[in-house]
Amino acid sequence: MGRSILTLAAVLWYSVASAVIPMPRSVEKHKGAFVVTPSTTLVYGDESLRPLAVYFLDYVALRSVNTVSPDKNYIRFGIDDALEEEGYRLTIAPEGIEISGGGYGGVFNGIQTLFQLFPSDIYTKQCHLPVTVSCGEISDAPQFSYRGFMLDVARTWSDADRVKRYIDLISYHKINKLHLHLTDDEGWRIEIKSHPELTRIGAWRGGSSPIRSVYGKWGERYGGYFTQRSMHEIIEYAAVRNIEIIPEIDLPGHSRTIANIHPEILCDYTPDPVPTDGYEYRSAWCAVKEDNYALLEDIIGEICELFPSEYVHVGGDEVDMSQWKRCPHCSDYAAANCDNDFSRLQEVFMSRVNDIVIRHGKRPAVWNEAINGGTLDCESRVYGWESVKECRKSASAGYGTIVMPGQFFYMDMRQSKNEDGHTWAAIFDVEQCYSFDFAKQGFTASELRNVEGVEATFFSELYISHNPETCDYLDYMLFPRLCAVSEIAWGKNGSDWENFRNRLQTKHYDRMAGMGVRFRISPPSVNYADGRLTASADGNASVSTSKENSGEWQRYTHPLKTDKPAEHLFRSEYRTAVSPEAAVPSHYDCIKPAFKITSSMPESPSRGFSYAEGYKGVSRTARTCRMGDTIVFEFESPLKCREVEFLTGYEHMPRHIFHSGYLETSVDGSNFERVAEMYGGRVKLIDPKPFRFARLVCTTEGNGTPYVIIPSPRIKPVL
Ligand code: ACM
Ligand code: ZN
């Protein structure tokens, strides 16, 4: 009897231990079990591990802590110099649990594995003891020393509590770098004491701020920033969790915020202020002005002082070089010194900035475009984001390289066709993310030697158009894709997609629920046959259903009899998780009736109104919007539909929009009735009365960009 219980315990342990994410290198099961009770002693054999004892007790309430071990009933942390720095050995024996790490990070990683052997309520910090853990040994170490996540706090502000929450979440996955994108065209988020104006002005946009609202919040004043003191606390919080914070000041492009505060950093030419309603839209530092390097010395000097990280990221992506081409100083310099190659001029700029970083005792990190001129020092670490090809180019040129091509690692990409998110790199879900494989992507052994690791990224321009007061959207975009990235970074250790999916669904979904993560699960499959609409979800998920535009969801329990299947939506739900909505394909059908656009704003010579009129793509105006501007859609015949949406801005990106406005409709083109208010640059009518004319009226001055985007309206047919 006793023996069969032990065997059962061993089998259960094996199934739990082999469900760890990221997959450990080796898992051995032994006989017996250890019971963790409140009287178990927590032992740390090395003073450097004291913070981990404090950390552990926050999750598991043990009454006694010591630096020497009793003979039995202990959980002991120790250092074993024979192990790799971040490697660990987790041994569970009948007398106690031992976690030996090569260093602090190794012990931390071992603790995370032990957490995954506990019930998932460990993550709620209210784990009920006793907990029985069956005996065995896990020996483990990461493939890559750099396992990163980048959060853009510039576009959508994330305060210290939110950043700490994501530090917890990524640390549970053994991710050890948090790259904070602190500055961009839309915000400056870190206090610089010698230049308080950078946050006093640049941490806020919209409303009365000179930094215009470009994304979201529809013109309201919006923002926030980290004081150096609060950043210091975040750095310490992260360090306990084996996470290094790598700051990024994005230069010389993506600098519109600082340029609005210090216009003297810009190139010397007078731009045409008409398209932007007088707003200074230039975004790049002049590469030649000597005073610019003095200002950068102040900023970078403070950043180097504040952050203990070995590296400081200084940007280098997506520089609009047309500004340098128009500048007499930059163009003369490029002609005299760079054979008119402006990528080389960028390298002149980056080299000067790198010198500042190095003089302050740090190493520079840059985005991959910064090495396009072919002369940047190999001391720089390169973050390859544009493509796998750019990552391989950087690694083969000898740069320490972080691999993060958008089609696998950009968590702001959409996860399936009808969801929200960017599409410029790819539409990909967790399965495609998990499919990333260095060999299949053509990395040679010598390239791989220069790969320091991988990084998942979240640029946050779309986040703000959801409810930025909650974490729901970011959670949904990150999880479970970030779990896949963590396993790619750790080394897949022979696992394949089916194996990973099984670990996710059987164990990790519950762990993420325990963590309070609003993660994404796959949508139900929906079928329509013989007048009956059915839906079924994967695994333990339930299904809910809703009639379109009702906003009300109920549990789906039986097939729906209907002759209008396109009206019904379904989604899967599991604890804290939700799937995207699913429907029969005809739900997504749109009609394309003929219409013409006229506007108080002139059309762009290169993207005129005919694009939207022909349903060929978006049109653009030739200037930004002003109060009272109009866009009129004139349909050839009265429009009858079950739903119509008029948009400004890109369909999935609220930018180049009317920040506020309203919609009027008319049957004759002279008598208009105000029928709805715009929100987020768009307005939708449900079951409208037929009309021939629709007029969008703008009620804000400017939109922070040089034009308005006009897509074709989205019109759903009467069923
Ligand atoms: C980037 O996505 N521009 C680094
Ligand atoms: Zn210049």
Image: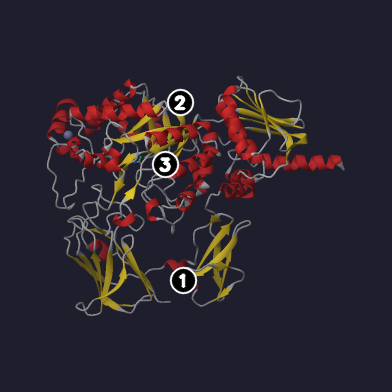
Q: How far apart are marks 3 and 2 (CA)?
A: 30 Å
Tell me the residue at 57%/46% (across/down): 515
Q: Mark 1 points at which residue?
A: 550
Q: Which amino acid does label 3 sit on?
A: Leu
Query: Is 489 placed left or right of 461 in the picture?
Result: right
For the residue pair 25 and 610, the one nearer the viewer reads as 25
The three-letter code of the residue at mark 1 reads: Ser
Classify mark 1: residues with Cα within 10 Å, few (<14), some (14-19) or many (20+): few
Q: Which of marks 1 and 2 is nearer the N terminus?
A: 2
Task: Tell me which corner region of the image, top left, top right, bottom left or bottom right, holds residue 574.
Answer: bottom right
The residue that disc 2 covers is 446
Q: What is the CA distance from the residue labelled 1 to the residue labelled 2?
A: 57 Å
Tell whether label 1 touches label 3 (CB within 8 Å): no
Query: Mark 3 or 2, which is nearer the eye?
Result: 3
- Quadrant assignment for the N terminus: top right
What residue is drawn where x is 62% and y is 47%?
Answer: 502
Q: What element carries label 1?
A: loop
- Whether tag 3 and tag 2 are in contact, CB under 8 A, the answer is no
Secondary structure at badge 3 equals strand
Q: Can residue 483 be seen in this view?
A: yes
Query: Which residue type does callout 2 highlight?
Result: Ser
Q: From the viewer's perspective, is 715 left or right of 587? A: left
Packing grade of label 3 (10 A; few <14, some 14-19, many >=20) is many
Q: Mark 3 points at which residue?
A: 151
Q: Quadrant of the C terminus?
A: bottom left
